[in-house]
Image (cartoon, grey):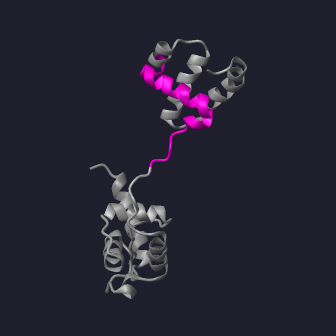
Amino acid sequence: MVRKNETVENMAAIKEIERATKSIQLARKLQSIRLVLEGYAVPEAARIAGCCEKTVYNNLNDYEEGGIEALYPKQRPGRTRKLTTEQEAELYETMKNKLPSQVGFFPFVNWTSSLAVQWVKERFGAEFSERGMRNLFDRIRLSYTRPTYTLKKADPQRQQAFIDEFEQVKKTDL
């Protein structure tokens, strides 16, 4: 069981971490342990923390065996990546330094997620959805923005005249 002098020393640390953490799971674990250390019975601590008694006992066992560090949530494995680190680096370099038309997507000059999906499928044989490709862009630090177009032959004076006329129309009551 946890020794009395140990609880006094760790109580401040438990409270601090409980307040600072963004993990609800960790906060609940710390709360259940703190309540027991403050003198609450396990059933009462479980009710207050919103978990079952078995969970409180498991949290206490983890705390006794490994301290506060043993309470942190374990990293979950998740799904394996479709591209290796080297393939992601190649995708990054290609999109950064080449136009789509330079890698076989004539007449396109702007990379889109759908073009990247096609290129990755042809180059690496991995299939992505457009949303999945945009998630990959975020992971490899590419920002995804839709292209905006400007008219090369636009007359600035006529544009300003239109804006002025438009402002006058907005001010009139119809």
Q: Nearer the viewer, residue 20 or 165?
A: 20
Q: Is residue 150 left or right of residue 89?
A: left
Query: What is the count of numbered marks?
Result: 0
> Is residue 54 on the magenta stretch?
yes
Q: Residue at x 68, y 25 (%)?
A: 12
The prevailing secondary structure element of the residues shown in magenta is helix
Give coordinates of residue 116: x percent, y percent. 36, 73
Numbered range of the magenta stretch: 48-76
- Between 11 and 57, the residue placed more toward the observer is 57
| As drawn, 103 above or below 26 | below
- On whether residue 167 falls in the magenta region, the answer is no
Please state the horizontal and vertical placement of residue 5, each as a whole percent of the image.
73, 20
Horizontal side of 67 relative to 99 (left or right) equals right
Q: Quadrant of the N terminus?
A: top right
Q: Residue furthest left?
A: 174
Q: Position of residue 87 (x, y in %)?
A: 44, 74
